Amino acid sequence: MADSVAGDGFARFTARELSPGTTRPEFDAFRAVWEDLEPDADLADGGAYRFRRYGLVRAVSTPDGFATEPLPHRGFRQDVIPMWRDAERHFAPLSSSTLADPCLGALVAFDLTVAGQVRPSREWVVGLHAIRVVARAGESGLPTPEGVHRDGHSFVGMHLVRRENARGGESRIHRTGRPDVVFTLGSPLDSVLVDDTAVRHAVSPIVPLDPYAGRTVRDMLLVDLNPA
């Protein structure tokens, strides 16, 4: 996977390759976090299709794995993206119990292990985004209203937590001078890790697969990785 990230700028993996190392009840408890997100009030298009919480931790490599500690909650900036340049966005915080969740810790450790083989660092600052995109009748859900973009980090891990009654949501990896790679994260823990300095990415809108089959949601955990 590290070779893929180094050579292609990204690597994909599934739940079979990426086990959070926890039981199904623990994973179900982790997924419940997405039922308690707050509206993202800073969408530039005025939409009401995205909900999220945000947290920040410091991760230090030790002989026994990665030790993490929460960092103070603060605003989030992405000046590399024209839509958000000069804007400090404020999201509801992830709870201390979520930051200590074993599933979250396992996913972060996996991302750090792969990223650390590409760009070694003993210490990292890790941003954590629990994001739900919804689609309703007459309103698509936009996972990336920014279009094709970089997030302004060293690496970004993207983990599918839940997908229900959704059509669309195709991920696109854009590599300058090379063909785009297009795929869909469809099952829980389908994931991709990108070298954000090497590639750009986007995700197409989601719409209801069946307008009479209940809610349409796409839940993601995004993990921003930056050497400290």
Image: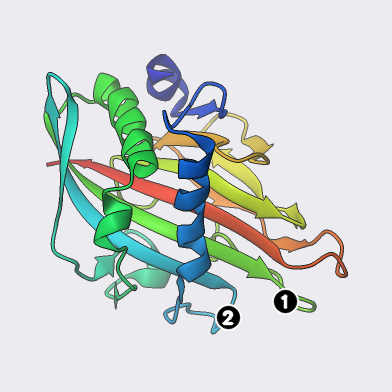
Residue at position x 60%, y 43% from top?
172
Circle 2 sits in a helix, a strand or a loop, which is it? loop
Would you place residue 147 above or below residue 63 in this image? below
The mark found on residue 167 in the picture is none
Q: Nearer the viewer, residue 98 or 44?
A: 98
Mark 1 and mark 2 lie on one chain; the one further toward the N terminus is 2
Residue at position x 50%, y 61% from top?
34
Query: Label 2 neighbourhood size at 10 Å, few (<14), some (14-19), many (20+)?
Result: some
Residue under pointer 1: 139
The mark found on residue 47 in the picture is 2
Q: At which x and y percent is residue 141?
A: 65, 67
Residue at position x 66%, y 52% from top?
163
Asked if residue 141 shows in the view, the reply is no
Q: At which x and y percent is residue 186?
A: 68, 41
Q: Quadrant of residue 115?
A: top left
Would you place residue 221 above or below residue 73 in this image? above
Asked if residue 16 shows in the view, the reply is yes
Q: Nearer the viewer, residue 134 or 117?
A: 134
Q: Which amino acid does the dot numbered 1 rest on?
A: Glu
Q: At which x and y percent is residue 133?
A: 59, 64
